[in-house]
Image (cartoon, grey):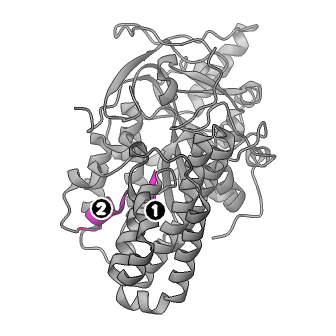
Amino acid sequence: MGPRTQLSRRRALASISALAGAVAGCTGGDSEDATTPSRTRTADPTATAPRSTEATENPDERAALIDAIDSEAVAIDPDASADGLGPVATRLAQSPIVGIGENSHGVSEFKGFAHRLVRRLVADHGYQLVAIEGTIGDFGPVDRYVAGADVDLDAAMGSIEFYFWRTDAIRRLFEWLREFNAGRPATDRAVVRGYDAQFFDVNATAVRSYLERVDPAYLDGIDERLMPLTRPLYERHDADLLTEARLDLFDSLGDRLRARRDAYVAETSTAEWRLARRHVRTLERGLRFQAALRAERYTQGKRVRDAAMAENVSWLRDWTGADRAVVLGSTNHTMRNDGSGEAARMGQHLADEYGDDYYSLGCLFGTGRFRAPTGPERTAFGTHDLEGPVPGTLAATLVEAAESSLFLDFETARRRAPIDGWLDDTSQVGVSVPRAADRGAVPLPAAPDAVYDGVAFVRDVTPASFASEG
């Protein structure tokens, strides 16, 4: 499906230019100002809902804004059944590609919300591709499980590089998808795939495995160069990740796959051959991303990674034949840009390609606690307490709404003058960054109405638990 010819007001704003952002990504090399003060504290579970610290020149205008938000917001319960998210799913389903971006990977409620919302989108609105932030080959075992194969789900999830998907809520989503697919023809099943390019070893391993099956003689000739790339990055100490020899290897792999297409397809399938080519492409992108990080060129790395993410989402839609896709990940990838920087996010690339067919939903928090890794191995985690929403953000106002958890669609809500003015006057969003988790919520300069089409807000959040803990 191509882009619509008409762009909404906020998406026209978002397409002005690209944004590097104050955060270089959800993992690896953030470029935040280290002098920004921490916003953490010890949480009091008996405390009442926090009030906004926003200055209010006119109390009547403030009251009118909160009343308008209360009238427009849809109450949600992240812990209730999926049935309660029907109205939210119906609104999102107006766009065939929905990006659900969480402002912290360590919030339990965001995982529960994603679990239930994806179920509604799949069951009620025909979404078939569940694309998840994770290297493109990571979710192969999970997808085989979802398709009904004899795969151990714990082992499949244990192979996922990104710790933040190894939660009970996401596990239950995969179990539900397997039940949903049972008895359905292959063309009517939901599929689960990763779209990221961060960890090149996953793709190198997939390419090597494919060649072992279809062209072992050729593999023998290149294995000395390919095998080292199958080792995880944290086990490596290469002085130069991106060498001429490796660039030549990628060219050789691409040429071989094209030249031997018919033989490889006969040995496997067209789909597997196409996937092998995508692994080669993503392997090269991942190596470029990691090389940029090692050189501390964070904006360049983000540019490479987010472009590859968007390219892979588009490719997955075509490869799976799934017109309707849910894209789960960090809000720093799923959101669009607002014209204040350089590097386009994945969401901006998707908006540029699909226009109003892409909906950017941000998952925001007010206060509470979240979980984050304490070291680069991402096997030990700490809990961090939020002081409250960052002043000047949407969350700083939404904490005053009647509903503790809500969904607000901006296009509909803008029909009310108080909300229209509020969105125009808000210039930042609050996020938590794994590499700076001890700082709690930090401000990211961005016009929310330009980067999001709507938000799901949870006033008080609790920390997620990951299967890799202990």
Residue at horizontal 38 percent and vertical 83 percent from the top? 217
Q: Amino acid at mark 2?
A: Pro
Query: Compared with residue 262, is residue 115 higher up or lower down, i.e. above or below?
Result: above
Q: In the image shown, does 62 or 442 lie closer to the viewer?
A: 442
Choose top left, top right, bottom left or bottom right for residue 373: top left
Q: Quadrant of the N terminus?
A: bottom right
Q: In the image shown, does 49 or 450 lie closer to the viewer?
A: 450
Check disc 2 and report its element: helix, strand or loop.
Answer: helix
Residue at horizontal 30 percent and vertical 52 percent from the top? 159
Q: In the image shown, does 404 or 442 lie closer to the viewer?
A: 442
Q: Taking 265 as reference, is 427 left or right?
A: right
Q: Taking 279 as reference, is 343 left or right?
A: right
Badge number at residue 375: none
Q: Taking 172 as reference, is 261 left or right?
A: right
Residue 323 visible to the viewer: no
- Residue 147 magenta: yes
Image coordinates of residue 332 in percent, x first then y, are 59, 39
Which residue carries the number 2 mark? 141
Residue 204 visible to the viewer: yes
Residue at horizontal 37 percent and vertical 58 percent from the top? 139
Number of residues whose C-alpha sits closer than 10 Å to that of mark 2, classed few (under 14), some (14–19) or many (20 or more): many
Image coordinates of residue 32 in percent, x first then y, are 63, 26
- Residue 366 magenta: no
Q: Amino acid at mark 1?
A: Tyr
Which residues fall within the magenta stretch? Answer: 134-148
Which residue carries the number 1 mark? 127
Number of residues whose C-alpha sits closer than 10 Å to that of mark 1, classed few (under 14), some (14–19) or many (20 or more): many
